[in-house]
Image (cartoon, rainbow, N blue to C red):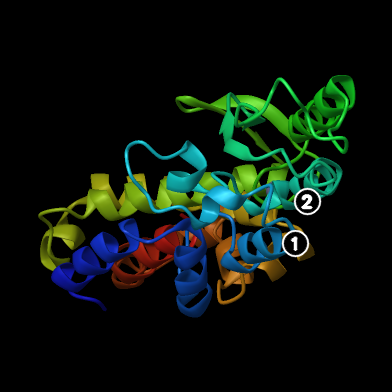
Amino acid sequence: MKGAGSSYDELVALRSKTVFERAKLLAASGDRSRLDMTAAHVLSLLERFPVLYREAWSARSNAASPFARDGFDVSDGWYDIISRMSTKLAVDPSLHVDQLKEKWGRLTVYLAPPENAAAPAPTAMPGEELDRAIDEAEEESERTCLVCGEPGTSEKRGRWVTVLCGPCDQLFEISETSRSIAERLEGLDLAAFKANVFVQDAIRMELLCIGHAAACQTPASRARLPGIGWDRLEHFKDAAANKGIPVEELWRFASEEAPELGRKLR
Ligand SMILES: [Zn+2]
């Protein structure tokens, strides 16, 4: 595990890099949240559309465009939508993306103001064609799971409106529940845990919830997250089996596996 100091130094170093440099570094490390676009996808878009996304090579500063700071501020599920939109926009070399993010469960794209509005280049895209290309992408995003790209629904989840498919929605359930399980152990050691039936029961209820969420996972969603013991998690939905888990095993799950599960699904 990395020390806090080195992670902080790495974070500071990353913040001073351009979007392109960060994607190169992250491609090598492979570490990311499920809500970030994978580095391979970022690099593919930048390599195919270097003019449209030219801000990816700009140094970050307060004065720079939001794209120079945040890059593709969405997850992988919208990669295909962005890729198709970019192919249409790249026909006009005077277009540059100034910001690309998720806002209220919808892809939102802002272009930089034209540098020479008085004399547009002969290759300039007609305004309505431009609007249509962006509108189509934004509308498609409203029904596309932002994590995996399967059909999804736009809903208020917690404080945010997001578009998720059923299995991805349940993954967030598992992640949240795992975190809540780990928090319940705060200040307890095994002896105190064994004596605290209230905490044990609360965790058994949460395991039930994780079991149901695991049962909602499709073969495709399981394949996207290898290294998770899906069958075992799914077993937790059986209340009788859940009740039969010995207290020591419950402790081990809550203290070791739950925090790890929360991290993998973040
Ligand atoms: Zn999904």
Residue 226 in view (yes/no): yes
Between disc 1 and disc 2, the foreground one is 1
Q: What residue do we see at 14% from left, 69% from top?
A: 5
Estimate the x, y position of residue 4 in percent, counting from the top left: 17, 67
What amino acid is found at the position of numbered circle 2 in the picture?
Ser
Which residue is nearer to you in this view: 89 or 230?
89
Q: Are marks 1 and 2 in contact (CB under 8 Å)?
A: yes
Estimate the x, y position of residue 150 in percent, counting from the top left: 79, 47
Q: How many marks?
A: 2
Circle 2 packing at 10 Å, graded few (<14), some (14-19), many (20+), is some
Q: Quadrant of residue 217?
A: bottom right
N-terminal of the pair, mark 1 or mark 2, is 1
Which residue is nearer to you in this view: 152 or 247?
152
Where 106 sits versus 215, above or below?
above
> Judging from the image, what secondary structure is the residue with disc 2 in?
helix
Estimate the x, y position of residue 218 in percent, counting from the top left: 76, 58
Where 88 sits versus 185, above or below?
above
Circle 1 packing at 10 Å, graded few (<14), some (14-19), many (20+), is some
Task: From the viewer's perspective, tell me whether residue 20 is left or right of residue 217.
Answer: left
Residue 106, numbered circle = none
Which residue is nearer to you in this view: 94 or 229?
94
The residue positioned farthest toward the front in the image shown? 119
Residue 209 in view (yes/no): no
Q: Which residue is mark 1?
A: 48
Estimate the x, y position of residue 223 in percent, counting from the top left: 71, 70
Q: Quadrant of residue 252?
A: bottom left
Task: From the viewer's perspective, tell me whether residue 180 is left or right of residue 31.
Answer: left
> Judging from the image, what secondary structure is the residue with disc 1 in?
helix
What amino acid is found at the position of numbered circle 1 in the picture?
Arg
Which residue is nearer to you in this view: 41 or 99?
99
Q: Which residue is mark 2?
A: 83
